[in-house]
Image (tube, helix red, strand yellow):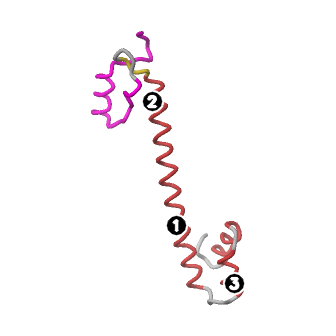
Amino acid sequence: MSGSDELKVKTVEMINMFAGTRISTDNAKGGQVMVSKAWKELVDAEREIGREEGWEEGISEGGDMLAKLLKILVPGSIEFDKALNATGNERMKLYKKYGILD
């Protein structure tokens, strides 16, 4: 089983070590790694990590912007209550209105 899409496990391990990649050798058969499949698994895993980091960053930024907005508004006012109960789009309009977002 030798083709242009296959590399020896040791070769993949060296690539990982020198290039700092994390190409998986878990599914190697006969000492050979199907590089395209391993590369796709790596890309998919990195994409998922990126999504999780982006989600966490978005939550943090959203919380910071809401805190800024609530500091500007008078507690108990109509605008304050509106900000607390707003949908994402409504809240974005309030951020722009009060100069929190461009």
Measured along the vertical axis of the image, is residue 52 above or below residue 33? below
Q: Which residues are magenta?
A: 1-27
Q: Which is more N-terminal, label 2 or label 1?
A: 2
Q: Residue at x 58, y 85 (%)?
A: 72
**Percent of width and height locating residue 18:** 28, 33
Q: Residue furthest top?
A: 1
Closer-to-camera residue (26/69): 26
> Which residue is label 3 attached to?
79
Q: Is residue 65 magenta?
A: no
In-image side of 100 versus 49 (left or right): right
Q: Quadrant of the C terminus?
A: bottom right
Residue type at the position of mark 2:
Trp
In-image side of 96 versus 68 (left or right): right
**Percent of width and height locating residue 20:** 32, 37
Mark 3: secondary structure: helix
- Distance of mark 1 from mark 3, alpha carbons? 21 Å
Closer-to-camera residue (3/96): 3
Could you classify mark 2 by the number of other residues whose Cα lies within 10 Å: few (under 14), some (14-19), or many (20 or more)? some
Q: Is residue 20 magenta?
A: yes
In-image side of 9 versus 46 (left or right): left
Q: Which is more N-terminal, label 3 or label 1?
A: 1
> Which residue is label 2 attached to?
39
> Which residue is label 1 attached to?
61
Q: Which is more N-terminal, label 2 or label 3?
A: 2
Look at the numbered discs 1 and 2 and tell me whether their residues touch, using CB distance below 8 Å.
Answer: no
Q: Residue at x 54, y 78 (%)?
A: 67
Residue type at the position of mark 3:
Glu
- Distance of mark 1 from mark 2, alpha carbons? 32 Å
